Image (spheres, coloured by chain):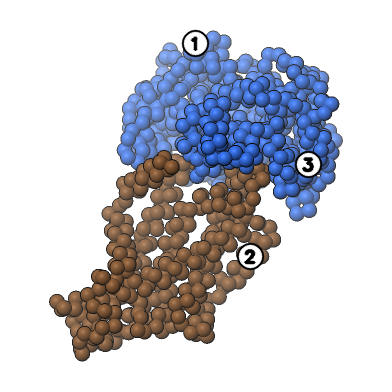
Chain colours: A blue, B brown
């Protein structure tokens, strides 16, 4: 949208950025992008990975990552050209007038320095403030960001605060010199769902109270509906759609924006009653009274007395935040870890505790799909070998047979058969996740444990993987145990769900029963954290969250 | 199979394109030295022990390009044969030390737990012996011969290789793709051969170059001390020792083999640095 306000704070015109590889070939990664940011306004850059959204936001600071360079266009900050500044002037600009909050605060803080020293570093070394003044302002910001103990939290080291707190501390670092423009690059992506809204709310309040202009970079459309005034949708470095938030949400024009809307992490309007709601008489897999722990004497309890059943052709969602024990449960079932007590039954027969003791025929039935396909696939093995090995290992196929089967399997997961000759690093994230899934399928299992397999993917790609899972289930009568923190996804695909918190299952049952009131407080907290596509949702959600958290602190499992 | 061969050709072409002049020079020198060592009997103008003149330390001439040594033998011919012995010993030693060190290091990392702890501490204990001292004691008590030399130095080198191999494998063992193989029910041998080794190959290749250089320096040092290669055979270290007095007479005879040792060591280091830099520079692209 062309701004009709007389003077925008930031005016980006025809910004073009190219990347150059080792051979000197150039690829345009941001192509002719223009937008304005009015004082005090928030614009959101939305797109999948590779859409150029981070490159644009860095370009606004006059910076291009190594190997990239800005080939055209202009960036004007209050009438002053950012791109024409010499480096020393740019350095003064960055950190004072334009500041940046990175995706992972944990990776951006120096673990060996106290938080205070890092937050006040810029104004103190530039001489803008004395140390005492800076500390005073930092404490004010900590309080404004809703951090606990604002007077003392800065004396801690980064590892002594939680991820959500660290992300807010990084915002304090960015705000301390009272910048005119704040750039937020996926600031909540790395956080747990229930923490996310608290951080988002803190950012929103801070931006509103200081009347700071901001650029908010994200791939999640439902999140920005809460904070942005304008939305700029990007794809492959080009602008797809640009307009006020209400208009984009209510009436998206571009087909791509509509696809983004469809794939957004929102709860379905109505939760369909599941195909297989009941606990089956003869479940495929049964977990009975499992307790497990880590540590030398397994004294750090990760799971307490877990009971769970998965029927033939059923999808069971296991939801919880990090530390809830959901991944540990998957590891127990697959035999990567032995329980302290309790057992896992397959077709009513108890399975040996560890992989090494299990018969090959039993191992074949239960396969595991890992979260991060980029580390779950050996970068030095061809796809053909990655997929062929389970076939030869479990099904005793010969070379020629397994080659044929690999081709068939690749087609089944909608990848070209020529991929058998490729190595994993040559594939995109979504393609790798398909291979990851195909490897589990190669064993011809009856149950696949999917550990957060969509959480590292862009929303549209994730949706495609979920569709693939559904079609495989229909054809092969597969059962899934779907481990995730994303309740909106589970609501769409699961028959039954189990909600985990602090190593226990706090609620389980058919999906429509568990997710419709009355539900357990923790389930409500999770539900409350799923963004809704309306602009007034955040304030209500934060209010509700605080009430639920207070109620949860009184529950028995919190006092372990 | 054809695709695999094409992949190799492509990788070689890529590597050739990345060569800098310095690295190309080092590589060319190493190849030349290897060829000279391999073809010594056909290249050397004279025999290894052939006494050609009564004069010690004759200056270079048309007949004797690098002059004569302390017994009146051709320095160039002896240099060529010396390179052959030094390279042969260093290659066999490094190969054996890698065979043992990598196997044990990988097994240690794959087993983990107490086995890993026991093997690592035992290795640390052996590492704490000064290498040259240990070699002197063993060789002195067993007498110097090629098998004794090779076994002793290979054993000492193995302890170094073990550390590197174990560290590499430990890093790889915690990757999800190894866990995927574990959960499939694969045995340790399969995991080591198919999951760990391919990912450790580049750093191991670089380490091979470094250890190879050390082996050359170590043999040369032993020979210089008189415990290495025994006359009438000689290697570069022996030649440095034999011709030391040349410096008293103002001749450079002893410097040629010394220079040879230095040049091989430096070239190998340049090449290895390039290899490592190239592989680490490539990692962000690949993963």
- Please rate how many residues cluster around mark 3, counting C-alpha atoms within 10 Å: few if below 14, some from 14 to 19, many from 20: many
Q: In the visual, does A10 lie left or right of A429?
A: left
Residue B113: x, y in percent?
Answer: 68, 58
Q: CA distance from mark 2 to mark 3?
A: 33 Å
Can residue B147 be seen?
Answer: yes
Q: Position of residue B152 (x, y in %)?
A: 50, 75
Where is residue A361? Give x, y as percent: 71, 40
User: Residue at position x 27%, y 54% from top?
Assistant: B21
Tell me the element at label 1.
loop
Whole-angstrom CA distance, mark 1 to mark 2, is: 66 Å
Query: Residue drawn 27% across and 86% down?
Result: B70
Residue A351 tag number = 3
Asked if residue B8 is positioned above or below residue B114 in the image, the reply reads above
What chain does badge 1 belong to?
Answer: A
Task: Give the total of numbered labels.
Answer: 3
Quadrant of the frame with the C terminus of chain A: top right
For disc 2, the neighbor class at 10 Å (few under 14, some 14 to 19, many from 20) is: some
Q: Mark 2 sits on what residue? A: B119
Chain under numbered label 2:
B
The quadrant holding residue A74 is: top left
Give the percent coordinates (x, y) of residue B260: 31, 71
- Residue closer to the observer: A285 or A451: A285
Label number found at residue A253 = 1
**Same chain check for tags 1 and 2:** no
């Amino acid at each position: 949208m062309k701004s009709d306000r007389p003077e925008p704070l930031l005016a980006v015109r025809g910004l073009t950025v190219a990347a150059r590889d080792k051979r000197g070939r150039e690829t345009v990664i941001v192509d002719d992008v223009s937008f304005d940011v009015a004082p005090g306004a928030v614009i959101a850059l939305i797109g999948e990975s590779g859409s150029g959204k981070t490159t644009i936001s860095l370009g606004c600071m006059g910076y291009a990552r190594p190997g990239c360079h800005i080939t055209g266009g202009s960036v004007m900050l209050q009438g002053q050209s950012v791109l024409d500044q010499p480096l020393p002037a740019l350095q003064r600009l960055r950190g004072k007038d334009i500041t940046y909050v990175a995706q992972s605060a944990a990776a951006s803080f120096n673990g060996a320095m106290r938080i205070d020293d890092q937050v006040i570093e810029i104004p103190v070394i530039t001489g803008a403030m004395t140390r005492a003044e800076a500390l005073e302002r930092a404490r004010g910001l900590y309080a404004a960001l809703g951090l606990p103990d604002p007077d003392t939290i800065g004396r801690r080291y980064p590892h002594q605060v939680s991820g959500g707190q660290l992300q807010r501390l990084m915002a304090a670092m960015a705000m301390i010199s009272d910048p005119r423009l704040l750039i937020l690059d996926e600031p909540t992506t790395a956080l747990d769902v229930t923490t996310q809204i608290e951080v988002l709310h803190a950012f929103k309040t801070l931006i509103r109270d200081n009347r700071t202009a901001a650029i908010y970079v994200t791939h999640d459309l439902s999140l920005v509906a809460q904070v942005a005034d304008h939305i700029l949708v990007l794809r492959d470095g080009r602008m797809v759609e640009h307009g006020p938030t209400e208009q984009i949400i209510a009436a998206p024009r571009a087909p791509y924006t509509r696809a983004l809307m469809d794939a957004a992490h929102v709860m379905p309007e109505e939760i369909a009653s599941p195909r297989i709601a009941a606990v089956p008489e003869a479940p495929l897999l049964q977990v009975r009274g499992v307790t497990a722990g880590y540590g030398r004497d397994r004294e750090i309890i990760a799971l307490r007395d877990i009971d769970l059943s998965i029927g033939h052709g059923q999808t069971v969602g296991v939801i919880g935040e990090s530390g809830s024990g959901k991944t540990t449960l998957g590891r127990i079932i697959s035999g990567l870890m032995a329980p302290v007590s309790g057992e896992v039954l397959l077709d009513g027969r108890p399975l040996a505790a560890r992989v090494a003791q299990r018969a090959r025929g039993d191992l074949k039935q239960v396969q595991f799909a890992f979260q991060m396909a980029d580390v779950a696939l050996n970068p030095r093995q061809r796809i053909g070998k990655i997929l062929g090995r389970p076939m030869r290992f479990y099904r005793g196929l010969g070379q020629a047979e397994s080659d044929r089967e690999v081709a068939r399997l690749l087609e089944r997961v909608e990848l070209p058969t020529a991929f058998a000759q490729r190595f994993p690093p040559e594939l995109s994230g979504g393609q790798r996740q398909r291979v990851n899934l195909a490897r589990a399928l190669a064993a011809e299992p009856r149950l696949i444990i999917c550990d957060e397999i969509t959480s590292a993917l862009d929303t549209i790609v994730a949706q495609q993987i979920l569709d693939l899972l559904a079609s495989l289930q229909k054809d092969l009568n597969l059962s899934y145990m779907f481990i995730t923190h994303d309740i909106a996804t589970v609501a769409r695909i699961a028959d039954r769900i189990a909600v985990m918190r602090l190593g226990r299952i706090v609620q389980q049952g058919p999906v429509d029963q568990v997710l419709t009131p009355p539900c357990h407080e923790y389930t409500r907290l999770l539900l409350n954290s799923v963004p809704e596509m309306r602009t007034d949702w955040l304030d209500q959600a934060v209010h509700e969250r605080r009430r639920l958290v207070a109620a949860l602190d009184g529950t028995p499992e919190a006092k372990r | 199979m054809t695709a695999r061969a094409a992949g190799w050709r492509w990788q070689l072409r890529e590597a050739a394109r990345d060569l800098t002049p310095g690295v190309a020079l080092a590589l060319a020198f190493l190849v030349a030295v290897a060829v000279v060592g391999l073809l010594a009997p056909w290249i050397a103008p004279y025999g290894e022990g052939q006494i050609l003149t009564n004069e010690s330390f004759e200056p270079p001439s048309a007949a004797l390009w690098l002059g004569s040594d302390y017994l009146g033998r051709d320095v160039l011919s002896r240099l060529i044969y010396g390179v052959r012995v030094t390279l042969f010993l260093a290659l066999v030693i490094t190969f054996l030390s890698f065979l043992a060190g990598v196997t044990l290091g990988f097994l240690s990392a794959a087993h983990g737990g107490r086995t890993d702890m026991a093997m690592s501490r035992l290795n640390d204990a052996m590492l704490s012996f000064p290498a040259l001292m240990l070699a002197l004691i063993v060789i002195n008590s067993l007498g110097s011969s090629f098998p004794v030399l090779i076994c002793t130095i290979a054993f000492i080198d193995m302890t170094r290789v073990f550390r590197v191999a174990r560290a590499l494998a430990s890093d790889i063992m915690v990757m999800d793709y190894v866990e995927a193989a574990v959960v499939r029910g694969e045995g340790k041998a399969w995991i080591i051969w198919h999951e760990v080794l391919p990912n450790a190959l580049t750093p191991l290749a670089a380490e091979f170059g470094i250890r190879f250089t050390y082996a050359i320096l170590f043999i040369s040092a032993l020979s210089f001390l008189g415990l290495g290669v025994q006359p009438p055979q000689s290697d570069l270290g022996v030649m440095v020792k034999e011709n030391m007095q040349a410096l008293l007479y103002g001749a450079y005879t002893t410097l040629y083999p010394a220079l040879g040792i230095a040049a091989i060591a430096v070239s190998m280091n340049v090449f290895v640095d390039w290899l490592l830099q190239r592989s680490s520079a490539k990692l962000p692209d690949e993963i």
